[in-house]
Image: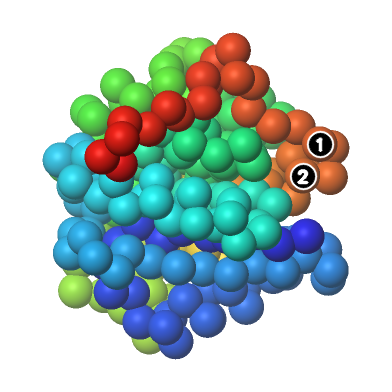
Amino acid sequence: MKLMIINPDWGVPRERMRQELKQLSAFVSPDTILDMECLQRTRVYLDSLADAVWAGPEIVEMAVRAEKNGYDAVVLYCFSDPALEACRQAVSIPVVGAGQTACLMIPQAGYQGCVLTADAGRIPEKLAAISRTGLDAGRILGFEGVSVEGLDVVRDRELVLERLAEAGRRILCRTPGQVLVLGCLIFLGMASELEERLQVPVLDAAALSVGMAELLVRQNIHSSRRAYPAWRRNSDN
C-alpha cells in the first residue's frame, strides 16, 4: 500500500518532511509506504481561509497526480482539510482530511472534546467548520490557542509541550471536556506525553490521518460518487 501525504504549505524543507515521515511510519503497518510532498508552485502557508482557497488548485493537481502514480490514498496534512471535497471529486482513491478524522474520533474516546490550536485568531473559523466534518457541533466544547510563534517544534519540543499542557489545563478547567485534540499537525508525536501530564485521551490528528487512510484502503472504502460527483474538467483545464 502507498499513501501520498500532501503538505499544503509551500517550500517545506525535504529534511523536515523526511523526519515527519519517519514519525508517521510508527502509526501504520510495516508494509505501508508513506511519501510526502508540499506545494511547489503556490507560494503560500495555510494561515487563513484565503490561503486555503489560493492553494486549492495545486492541492487538487497533487491528488490527481498521486492517483496516476499508483498511490492508494491521499492524506491532506492540515487540520483545516483544504480542498478536501474537491479532491474527492477529482480522484477515485480515498482522500483523508486530518481535521475531519481527528474530530470524528472524539466519540470513540469520550462524549465531548476540546481542541488545542496553534492559531488563536482562527478559532471562529474553525468552530464554524466543525459541521463540515460530520461531527455534531455539541461534541466540541471549545478551542484553546497555544502560542508557538518563534519556536521550533523540534528544537524547542519541551517548551512546546509545556505550553500545550498549560493550554490543556486551562480548557479542561473551563469545560467538562474529556478528550483533547491536537488541532495542528506540527504537534505530531506529542499526544502520548501530553496525555501523561493531563490524564485525558489526546488525539494526534497527524497520526490518526495516516491510520485512517490505511484503514479505508484495507476495507476498500472509497468516496461515494453520489456525494462527490466525478470532476468533469472544462476543455481548458
Q: How is the image coloured?
A: rainbow
Residue 155 lies in quadrant? bottom left
Q: Residues within 10 Å of mark 1 (few under 14, many from 20)?
A: few
Report the residue marked by disc 2: 217
Give the answer, above or below, for where 174 lies relative to 137.
Answer: below
Q: SS for tag 1?
A: loop
Q: Residue at x 52, y 81 (%)?
A: 18
Q: SS for tag 2?
A: helix
Residue 50 lies in quadrant? top left
Indicate which disc residue 220 carries: 1
Give the answer, above or below, for where 226 lies relative to 222.
Answer: above
Q: Position of residue 207 (x, y in %)?
A: 62, 56
Q: Position of residue 90 (x, y in %)?
A: 48, 36
3 relative to 181 in the view: left or right: right
Q: Residue at x 51, y 14 (%)?
A: 136
Instruction: Report the front residue among 129 and 178.
Output: 129
Q: Quadrant of the C terminus?
A: top left
Report if residue 63 is visible in the image: yes
Label 1 close to label 2 by CB (< 8 Å)? yes
Q: Residues within 10 Å of mark 2 (few under 14, many from 20)?
A: some
89 relative to 49 in the view: left or right: right
Q: Quadrant of the N terminus?
A: bottom right
Q: Position of residue 208 (x, y in %)?
A: 63, 49
Q: Residue at x 41, y 61 (%)?
A: 7
179 relative to 127 in the view: left or right: right
Q: Position of residue 172 (x, y in %)?
A: 45, 37
Q: Residue at x 43, y 21 (%)?
A: 132
Residue type marked 1: Asn
